[in-house]
Structure formats: C-alpha cells, structure tokens
Amino acid sequence: MQQNLQNISLKTGAPMESHAATVLTPFAFSKLQEQLVLAAHYASFPMEDSFLVRHHTKLEGGRRVYWIPRDGIISCSCHLFEFSGILCRHALRVLSTGNCFQIPDKYLPLRWRKISTSSSKLLHNAPSDHAERIQLLQSMVSNLISESAKSKERLDLATEQVSILLSRIREQPVSSPAVRDAASIHRNF
C-alpha cells in the first residue's frame, strides 16, 4: 500500500505509520518505517509478565518485550530505543498486536520530531531543561538538513547562514558551569 504524505511514502498502511509520518523528521520516520515493515515478519507470544517476540521462521529464541499499556511504557531486550531513540520491530509488533494505533509520545523523542509552532514557542518562552533544549536544537538542525538538501539554492543558502550563525555563537561567552556540564554531556550523544 502506497500513499504520499508530504513526500513520504507509507508502506504498511498502519495507523502508527501515519501518525509517525506527521510527527517525525523524514530521517527518523524512515528509520522507524524500516522497523515497522520488519515488525510484520514477527510473531508475539504473551508470557506471564512480558511478550516473547521472534521472527516467524524461528522456533527458538527471540526478544523479551515488557509493555504496561496503562502507563504507556514499553521496553525491549534489544535496547534499540535506548541506543537510537527509535522503537524496535519487537516493541512495534507488541504495540500493533495490542491494538495501539499511535506511538506513545515518550517514544517520539524531541530530537527526532518535526519542529512545530509550539516547539518554537517552547524554545523562546519557557526556560526548559538544558538537555531538552539541546534535543530541540538537534531536531531543528535535522529539519534544516532535510529541507536544504532539496536543491542547490537551498543548500547554498543554508551553508551561508549557518556559517554566519556559527561565527556569532563562537563570539558568545560560555557562562555557567551547568551549561558547560551540559555541553560535555552533548559531546557524548
């Protein structure tokens, strides 16, 4: 099934895919979409306190997925989400078989989201957590790259403006220890 949503091709027709396409940057959506397509090849088996998820051709092994629907918490033993910020095929399979039609917000990190007006307002109006602001900036940069790559003119403009912005930022003092600590955390991303 193919359907276009702002230059994005939907491959599964699943409500979770449509929802993700409206929320995630094109790069993040393509990574999640890969996992959604692969999820269709997996079976999930309810266990006492979790689900066992394995490829439909395998009789042994698999991944453990813990899901608490009332709290919107899902976790997989493969730890793809913790590593990349993208839910894995195993967790997506469990959500799908559990009739979950949207990916819970906590599994759509700010760094992978498209920037909306409300996100822009958050940046300017609320002195939010420094780490959250870094994630928001990462998301904005991801969108900048996606939009700039569409033409030579856009790429030239973005390169020129980012160069100017970077020069201005380097002129600013590094003010507080908390900001310096957050900068060192950012280097570990």
Image (cartoon, rainbow, N blue to C red):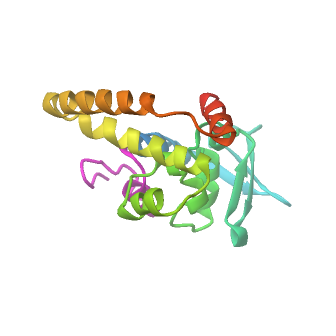
Is 154 covered by the magenta stretch? Answer: no
Q: Nearer the viewer, residue 37 or 82?
A: 82
**Residue 29 visible somewhere in the drawing:** yes
- Secondary structure that dominates the magenta span: loop
Q: Is residue 164 above or below residue 9?
A: above
Residues in magenta, as a range: 1-26
| Point 38% across, 54% down: residue | 115
Q: Nearer the viewer, residue 154 or 87?
A: 154
Q: Position of residue 162 (x, y in %)?
A: 31, 31
Q: Residue 149: horizontal and vertical position, in percent? A: 25, 32
Q: Position of residue 40 (x, y in %)?
A: 52, 49
Q: Judge whether residue 16 is colored magenta.
A: yes
Query: Which one is in front, 115 or 87?
Result: 115
- The correct choice, above or below, for 170 with respect to 34 in the image is above
Residue 123, relative to residue 149: is it above or below?
Answer: below
Q: Is residue 40 visible?
A: no
Q: Hey, which residue is sitting farthest right in the picture?
A: 48
Residue for point 61% across, 46% down: 131
Q: Residue furthest bottom?
A: 70
Does residue 42 appear left or right of residue 14 in this picture? Answer: right
Q: Quadrant of the C terminus?
A: top right
